[in-house]
Image: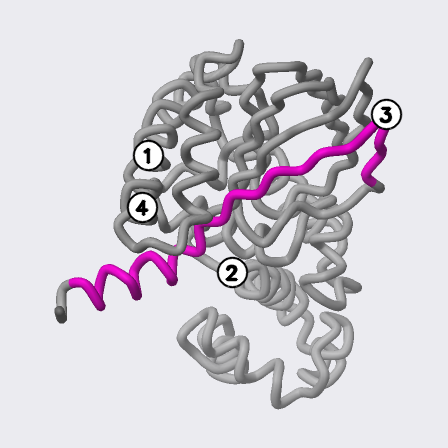
C-alpha cells in the first residue's frame, strides 16, 4: 500500500495532463506565453502556423510539435472541415532530462506524419481514466513517446547557449544600471519568468538576479578606483536601494566588504 501511495504522489507531482480540442473553421490564439509546463501537441486535422518573435513553424495533420515552457507565441489555425488537436502538458522533471531548457519550438520528425496518432489517442484515454491502473499505463506510454522525441530533438539542440539566454545576458550587460526586475528581462526576451529562471539555472547554474548583481558589482569595483566616489554614490549609480544593500551584495559576490576591497587596492 505504501508503494502505491508513493507512486500516486509521484504521478500527481509530475502533473501530466492530456487534452483534446476541437474547433470549426479558422481559429487564432492571441500571442501568449506558453503553458506553465512543456507541451507536446498532436494535430489530428487542420493546420497551424506557430509564430514566435524569431521563428515560424508550419504543422499539419499528423504532425507532432514541441512547445517549450514559457515561450511567447501565437498560433493561426485553418481547416477545410474542422480543427482537432491533442495537447500534452508536462513538467521537465517528469523525464529527468537536463536539456529541455535549450530546446526551441519545433516539429518532432520521428513522431510526425501520423505515425503516433493511435498512441496519442490512447494516451488521452488512459490519462483521463479514473482507474489508477489505466493512469499508470498512460504514464508508461508518455515516457515511451517522450523518449523517442528526446532522441530526435537531441540532434537539433543548437550549439552554445540558447538564444533566449544569450538575449537575456546581453540585455543585462547593456542595462545593468536600470534593470528593475526579472519580469522586465523576461518580457524583453519574450519568455516567462519561470522559463528565464530555468534557463539560467540549467545553463549557467545561477539565477537572473545573481547574474545581474555580479555584473553590477563588477562595474562597481571599477568605480571604486575613484577614491572621490563614496559608497553611497556608487550604490545609487548601480541602482541599489541603499548603501546597506550594496554592501551586502558586494560581500556575497566578492567575499569581502567594499571597505576592505578598497584597502587591499591601495
Q: Which residues are magenta?
A: 4-29
Circle 4 SS class: helix
Residue identifier under label 1: 141
Which quadrant of the structure image shows residue 5? Answer: bottom left
- Give residue 149's quadrant in the image: top left
Q: What whole-number distance in Å separates the C-alpha atoms at marks 4 and 2?
A: 39 Å
Where's residue 109, x and y in %?
Answer: 49, 13
Residue 80, image x and y in percent? 82, 13
From the viewer's perspective, tell me whether residue 79 is left or right of residue 68: right
Q: Residues within 10 Å of mark 1 (few under 14, many from 20)?
A: some
Determine which of the numbered discs, if any, sits on residue 116 in the image: none
In the rendered structure, are the residues bearing label 2 and label 3 in contact, judged by CB atoms less than 8 Å apart? no
Mark 4, residue position: 134
Looking at the rendering, in which quadrant would you find the N terminus? bottom left
Q: Are the residues flagged by discs 4 and 1 in contact, CB closer than 8 Å?
A: no
Q: Which residue is depicted at the point 50% across and 52% down?
A: 198
Mark with earlier residue (2, 3) = 3
**50 relative to 119 in the view: left or right:** right
Q: Which residue is mark 2?
A: 207
Q: Earlier in the sequence, mark 4 or mark 1?
A: 4
- The span from disc 2 to disc 3 (Cα, nearest Å) is 44 Å
Amino acid at each position: 500500500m505504501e508503494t502505491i501511495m508513493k507512486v500516486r504522489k509521484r504521478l500527481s507531482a509530475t502533473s501530466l495532463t492530456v487534452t483534446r480540442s476541437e474547433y470549426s473553421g479558422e481559429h487564432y490564439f492571441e500571442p501568449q506565453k506558453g503553458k506553465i509546463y512543456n507541451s507536446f501537441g498532436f494535430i489530428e486535422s487542420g493546420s497551424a502556423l506557430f509564430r514566435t518573435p524569431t521563428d515560424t513553424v508550419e504543422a499539419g495533420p499528423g504532425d507532432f510539435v514541441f512547445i517549450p515552457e514559457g515561450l511567447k507565441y501565437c498560433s493561426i489555425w485553418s481547416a477545410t472541415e474542422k480543427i482537432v488537436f491533442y495537447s500534452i502538458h508536462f513538467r521537465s522533471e517528469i523525464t529527468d532530462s537536463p536539456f529541455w531548457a535549450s530546446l526551441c519550438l519545433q516539429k518532432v520528425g520521428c513522431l510526425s506524419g501520423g505515425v503516433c496518432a493511435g498512441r496519442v489517442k490512447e494516451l488521452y484515454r488512459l490519462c483521463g481514466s479514473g482507474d489508477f491502473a489505466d493512469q499508470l499505463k498512460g504514464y508508461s506510454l508518455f515516457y515511451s513517446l517522450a523518449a523517442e522525441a528526446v532522441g530526435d530533438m537531441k540532434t537539433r539542440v543548437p550549439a552554445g547557449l540558447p538564444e533566449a539566454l544569450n538575449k537575456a545576458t546581453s540585455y543585462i550587460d547593456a542595462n545593468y544600471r536600470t534593470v528593475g526586475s526579472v519580469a522586465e528581462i523576461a518580457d524583453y526576451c519574450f519568455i516567462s519568468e519561470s522559463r528565464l529562471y530555468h534557463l539560467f539555472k540549467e545553463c549557467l547554474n545561477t539565477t537572473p538576479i545573481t547574474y545581474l548583481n555580479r555584473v553590477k558589482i563588477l562595474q562597481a569595483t571599477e568605480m571604486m578606483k575613484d577614491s572621490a566616489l563614496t559608497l553611497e554614490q556608487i550604490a545609487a549609480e548601480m541602482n541599489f536601494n541603499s548603501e546597506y544593500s550594496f554592501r551586502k551584495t558586494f560581500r556575497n559576490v566578492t567575499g569581502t566588504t567594499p571597505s576592505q576591497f578598497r584597502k587591499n587596492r591601495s
